[in-house]
Image (cartoon, rainbow, N blue to C red):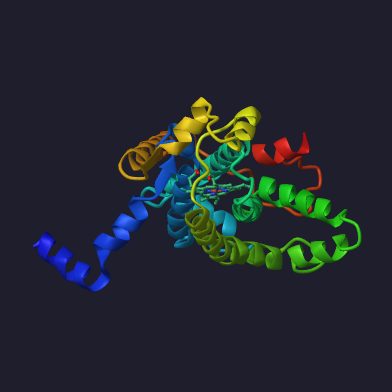
Amino acid sequence: MASKIYEWLDTRLKLDAVGRRLLDEPIPGGASWIYVFGSATLFLFLLQAITGMFLTLYYAPTPDHAYDSVQFIENEIAFGSFVRGLHQWGASGMVVAIGLHMLQVFLYGAYKPPRELLWMVGVVLFLITLGFAFTGYLLPWDQNAYWATQIGINMVGTVPVIGDLAMRVLRGGETLGALTLSRFFAVHVLFLPATIAVLILLHLFILRCVGPAGPWRGGVERRRSGEPGASGPAERRLRTSEPFYPRQVYMDAVVMLAVFASLSLLALTVSFPLADKADPSDTSFVPVPEWYFLLELV
Ligand code: HEM
């Protein structure tokens, strides 16, 4: 039965040919565990999208209901606290994965010609990832969310020339309130996901056009490679290549499984309790930003 359905689809969609094109992509130097960070980031993005969709079923983006709706998800909904935990840990995981991906690409010199466009699109992907984190932080509407966002927006206000305007656009008015919450929600669940999805496809399309960079080569070896007959160990490795399937697919899948297992364990054991409900009159509250925004201040 399954093979009949496959045959029917294959005659119409040429699944075999498409699958071969996707899986036979040659990797210079062969598969390696060091190339897993891009697909780990992709996996985390998809996990964020799926858990986010489920959270949106119950979340209400208004100052009157946001806090209670998150409490409701946390305490009343079946698997609510698990899904929220996955989304919270997944956010940190995505920042870590994208950081490791950038580091690998940088150390291997994979940003160099002809891959500059891949790097440039990547930089926008990184900024969007931070945009997700910043807009998501306000949504639970507790004291931390409110005051950390207030500080973030005030920092934007210090940008020369456009600071004031940017601050008003972010807030949707003169003060942080209902309009800010609804626009942060819209940006978090509509604008950013739509943009990042298009840019990820573009990122992967460019990768397909230029092909993966392959193993790291030292400066001497690269200079030598211009000379006929000269070859170092990495040059020799570069000349051999291996298709994406099966070994690289296997490595990527193992890492995705390990990431999912670790996040699930964290989501089940470490919860994210809310602070008190946001109180705009309580100016004595000292908020704590997420760790990745702290790193940027160091
Ligand atoms: C949502 C974020 C991102 C996703 C889903 C993503 C996904 C991927 C994937 C699946 C690959 C192929 C496998 C690999 O080499 O790891 C790749 C390659 C690459 N990415 Fe990303 N990426 C993201 C962000 C970034 C960022 C922030 C940068 C740099 C600023 C970047 C630069 C590159 C480069 C230069 C390559 C080619 C690597 C090579 O040829 O060896 N990416 N990306």
* Number of marks: 0
236 on left or right of 23: right
Answer left or right for 166 relative to 74: right
The foreground one among 144 and 215 is 215
| Residue farthest toward the bottom in the current orientation of the protein | 12
In which quarter of the view is residue 219 placed? top right
Residue sitting at the far right? 161
Q: Nearer the viewer, residue 191 or 184?
A: 191
- Residue 98: % across, % down: 57, 43
Among all residues in the image, which is located at the extreme left? 1
Query: Who's the residue at 44% across and 62% down the image?
Result: 57
Can residue 289 be seen?
no
Residue 289: where, in percent of width, then height? 69, 41
- Residue at 40% x, 52% y is 77
Within the image, what quadrant is residue 187 found in?
A: bottom right
Above or below for 17 versus 70 = below
| Quarter of the image where the N terminus is located | bottom left
Q: Residue at x 23, y 73 (%)?
A: 12
Q: Which residue is pictured at 51% across the width and 32% down the height?
A: 235
Q: Nearer the viewer, residue 213 or 49?
A: 213
Q: Which image quarter holds the C terminus?
A: top right
In the drawing, does residue 53 fall left or right of residue 286? left
Residue 98 in the figure: left or right of residue 36: right
Q: Residue 164: percent from the left, percent from the top? A: 87, 63
Q: As drawn, which residue projects farthest toward the top?
A: 233
Does residue 22 appear in the picture of this structure?
A: yes
Percent across and percent down for residue 277 are 64, 50
